[in-house]
Amino acid sequence: MTQNRSWIPYLLILPTVVFLGLLFVVPLIQTLWLAVSDNGVPSLANMQTMVRDINFGRSILNTFLLTLAVVPIQIAMALAMGSMVSKVNGGRETILWIWTIPLGISDLAAGMVWLSILQNTGYLNTLLFSMGLIERQTAWLTYQTPVALFVGIAIAEIWRGTAIVMIIIVAGLNQVPKEFKEAAEIFGASPWTRFTRITLPLIRPALQSALILRTVLAFEVFAVVYALGGRNFPVLVGEAYNWQNQNQNYSVAAAYAVLIMVISLAATLFYLKVIKVDPERLP
Amino acid sequence: MTNIVIDNIRKSFGPFQALKDVSLTINDGEFVSLLGPSGCGKTTLLRIIAGLETATSGDISIGGRSVIGLPPKDRGLAMVFQNYAVFPHMTVYENVAFGLRMQKADEARVRKQVEKAAGLLHIEPYLDRYPNKLSGGQRQRVAVARALAVEPGVLLMDEPLSNLDALLRLEMRTELKTVLQSAGTTTIYVTHDQTEAMGLSDRIAVVHDGRIEQVGTPVEIYNHPATRFVGGFIGNPPMNFITMPVLAGQVAIGSESFSVPTSSGDIVLGLRGETVERAPSGQGLEMQVRVAEPMGSHLLLTGSILDQPARVILPATETVRNGETVGLTLDAKRVTWLSPEDGVSYPAAA
């Protein structure tokens, strides 16, 4: 009976395929065309405009620096948090629930939260002042304090984006039977050796997913940066936004969008290549 | 000398007492099984010996040295787990070598020990493979080889055969016996399978409800169970328990009388199904046969004796019809008498 209705699965899948096709693939092709054409003729003019812009180099540098600073810290923190919570018997769900709160906050709201902490009249300055560490309001988020601005943005991004990494890592850790760690312990492996030689290799798939997802999202960073640094800290998506809205130049914005997509794809391929997941070597 | 002395080990999980003052001494080179139904505490005891779990109170010494508080690696033992716990991301060679690598053994010794253990367990052809390419039986061989490669003083095995299919289990059981005999390692083997325990062990400790009910050789435990639980748990079919009245220290069975260790009241006859013979018609202990099943090697009778359920085994040459009443002759030396109150058996007649 089921053999005779082999078209049913396709029918059920069809709406999602049509939906994504219309609202994803079509705009993607339009964006690609927009980026590599000028008045309907193929052209590299938009790319040239993008590359010659004063903020282009800085936005690439900033985006990469931020990604390089934020992603490894997030992975390390997620691993530490996941390992710690796996040792907890009672209250595990509550701890995970609290840790995942930042997931429920939009990135712009997260940026505003950190703005209220780091701005001139913010909580940080109030605290430092009351402790007598500073004598007057100190600015952290201006173009004159690039290091403080970078650190502020990085901290806000780490605070906002670690939860999703942690969820993937915790799911991966739950997949590792405890007997593997116990066997390693019996045969004399220290806690650190158990982590590096047993746990890490066994959560490779989760690690790979977390790295890809988090890195792609890091290249798309925008709202937190915009809230904290405005144009003092140009990033790629911010430039795309500016070309689109301030300059009303959709073609250069499209060129940025294509560039971000290429970088994300390259990062994904890099992780797929470097962190190979061999199903033969998994439980 | 790697003897193990378990002294009054108690373990509580909250209000639940998993182990209630368990004591057991295991001699150097001895193979002892902890046998009992699931949830009886046998695995908990093994994990306490391993150091994966801490006892609430009591002491354990291995080779004359108390190991309470020592981490597993300082106890000089190795362990084989029920689900093998063979590392999937390492080759068979690296799995077997794992313990030696942790001990920072030099490459020559690693190679020598791995080859020796692999040879014992016949896994040389798979040394370069990953465990996912191996069958359950081969993975269990790898797990045993990994344990033997470190030449442990004590080998702990937690239901190592229970994930294998029946045929493979039988094959591995025989092989384990050969391998462990030649290794001469003191072994504690946890199982719920009485045939494994009977076949492999020098001695069996029957665990029930957090206590050791009886410790003895397989034959002792089989022939003279210390409690009703032990008799009922061991043997297939399990021991029959028939309550009978005692008159002046005697129990009348058919035309015979048996002297029993109590003078009046009731006593429970513990009867192994295969220790009976068919009596001439009209004599012996009467059994009403409900179902007679010819099993080829023997004839299995299910029915009742003195209105109490019973199962006995007669030679395959006998023929019994369903619903027939047969007389059974008992062998006084091979029956066990138990107290009807607490189910504890009276000492075997000398």
Image (spheres, coloured by chain):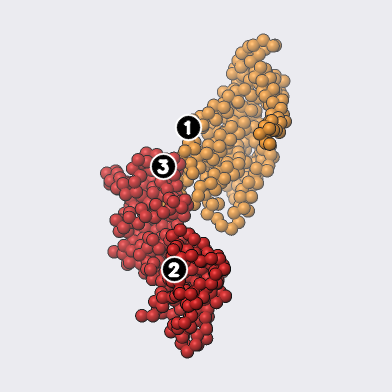
- Seen from this angle, which residue lies furthest front? B281
Q: Nearer the viewer, residue B6 or B229?
A: B229
The residue drawn where x is 46% and y is 87% is B249
Mark 2: few/some/many CA within 10 Å (<14, 14-19, 20+): some
Q: Is residue B307 left or right of residue B123?
A: right
The reply to whether dot 1 and dot 2 touch (C-beta < 8 Å) is no
Query: What is the display colour for chain B?
Result: red
Label 2, secondary structure: give it.
helix
Rendering coords of residue B182 (x, y %):
29, 56
Which x, y percent locates residue B129?
39, 39
Q: Which residue is mark 1?
A: A274
Disc number placed over residue B274 in the picture, else none: 2
* Front residue (pair A169, A122): A169
Indicate the quadrant containing the N terminus of chain A: top left, top right, bottom left or bottom right.
top right
In this rendering, would A135 be left or right of B297?
A: right
Real-space Cα separation, disc 1 to disc 2, in angstroms: 66 Å
Q: Residue at x 49, y 44 (%)?
A: A283
The colour applied to the residues of chain A in this rendering is orange
Residues under numbered marks 1 and 3 in contact, where contact means CB atoms less than 8 Å apart: no
Secondary structure under the numbered disc 3 in the rendered image: loop
Q: Callout 2, which amino acid?
A: Glu
Above or below B231: residue B105: above
Res. B315 visible in picture: yes
Identify which amino acid the numbered label 1 is placed on.
Val
Q: Is residue A15 above or below residue A83?
A: above
